[in-house]
Each structure stands twice: as C-alpha cells, then as structure tokens.
Amino acid sequence: MIPGIVGLCFLSFATPDGREIMQKSRDASKLDGMEAISTLLIYDAKGRERVRQTSMASKLFESGATEKRIIRFLSPAEVKGTGMLIFDYDKRDDDMWIYMPALRKTRRIISNEKSKSFMGSEFSNADMSAPSLEDFNYTLSGSEHLEGTDCWIVEVVPVNEDIMDEVGFDRKLAWIGKKDFVFRKAEYYDEDDELFKQMISSDVRQMDTSGKKYIATRMEMSNLQNGRKSVMTIDKIQFNPDVKEEYFTLGYLERL
C-alpha cells in the first residue's frame, strides 16, 4: 500500500484521548443561540416534590470562546423573578451573578459558592456552566454500551484542591457518546473516593444539523448519600442564533 494511505487509515481509526473527547463534547453542545423553557423537579428523601419552572437563553460571543446564559425562574411565586447570569469562558474562570427580587439586589457568585446547591436542588451552581478544560486532567478509562449508546468513559480529576472545592468533587467518571459526544452519565466521587452523586442524561435532540450540535433534554441528578433527587427537563427549546444580546446583561437580569 502507498505509505500515505496507510497513515490516513491509521488516523481514521485512532482512539481519541480523554481530553480530546471532552473538548469534542463541549463543542458539540455549543449552540450559536438558543431559548428554552424547563421544569425542575426537586424530590426530598421521602419523595416529596417541589416544582420550579424556568426560562433560559444562551448565545455565543467572541467566535465561540464565550457562551453567555441567562436563567430566570417563572414559578412558583416564592422564586418568581430570581435569575442567574453566567459568562462561560473557555480558558478562565466563569463569571456568575444571581438576582434576588425580594432584595432587589444582584450579587456575584464567588468560587467557593459554585459547589453549592442550585436553588435547593441536587444540581450545583457549577453544573449550570461548562468548566474550563484547563482545570482538569483526563484519562480515557474504557468504553461501555449505555442504554443502547456506545460511550467512551473518561475519568476527570481537578488539577488542584481549589478546583476540587469549586466543583464539589475529587474525581468524576463521564460516559460520552461516541457518535454525538453527548454526556450520557456522570458519577461523582468524594475525598474518600466514595460515589456520592450520579447524573443520567437522556432524550438527546439534534439542534443544529449543519454543525452537528446536540442537547440532552432530560437530566436526573441523584444524591446517593442523602437520598434526594432532582430532575431537569427541557419542555420547549428553539435553536435561535439571533437571540438578543441585551438578554445577557446585568440590567436585563434585574428587569422584572
């Protein structure tokens, strides 16, 4: 065979490393613009349910290096108007702000608050954005079929204790679809290397066929230590590259 052809065949079947898989997963979820309505169900250890409805919009800036996202709670009455503005950067720490209508005040969410609960759910504030790839080391641990989807399994370990404190775990195993690079499952381990949380993503939808962009429209986070569970479902979603830029400002966040 011609040497050049041999090289091309080898590259075509080469297994990507852990970092490459995570980069492709991040890229596959980035939409030029999007608007959605979601429902957040919060279950306590006895199965009692609380319901939250939110609206969300996102848009890419700086040629995709920054994704800005706004989340606003629509119901129930006690959280209506509460909002979060997120600037999700590729290569530096994200910026997050939360607006509390009862106080008519916006405050920045600092690093050590990102591991805390997102509005009383088992999701954390850090789960609302994609962390910088530079903050973790990645190891490809293997592959597995998960609910009919062939997945890579990648071990994700924060590079230092500060990042561990910020994200709320000491290591994570991530199941990433080999074809669409969508997160299908994640397991979170604490400082004693005990599994304490698990997330399952499902109902994957292709949003932008030209760019091969995908979104999981149902995410279930289970806390194995306290027996609580939270389910976030996207009820309506629209790919919209022309989302207004004014949505992603502190002024708009504070608008009731």
Image: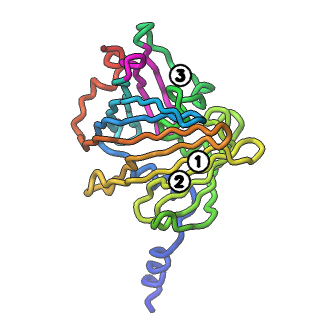
Which of the two discs, 1 and 3, sits closer to the camera? 1
Residue type indicated by callout 3:
Ile
One can see residue 93 in this view: no
Instruction: Give the magenta part as a residue range.
Output: 76-100
Q: Position of residue 86 (x, y in %)?
A: 43, 29
Of residues 71 and 3, the one drawn nearer to the viewer in this rendering: 71
Q: Is residue 31 depicted above or below 110 in this figure? A: below
Instruction: Determine crowd level at label 1: few under 14, some 14-19, many 20+ residues with C-alpha closer than 10 A.
Output: some
Tell me the quarter of the picture where residue 85 sits: top left
Looking at the image, residue 128 sits to the left or right of residue 35; the answer is right
The residue sitting at 38% across, 22% down in the picture is: 76
One can see residue 168 in this view: yes
Looking at the image, residue 119 sits to the left or right of residue 237; the answer is right
For the C terminus, the quadrant is: top left
Looking at the image, residue 245 sits to the left or right of residue 179; the answer is left
Looking at the image, residue 153 sits to the left or right of residue 36; the answer is right
The residue sitting at 43% across, 53% down in the picture is: 202
Which of the two discs, 3 and 2, sits closer to the camera? 2
Q: Residue 120 carries which label?
A: none
Query: What kind of element bears circle 1?
Result: strand
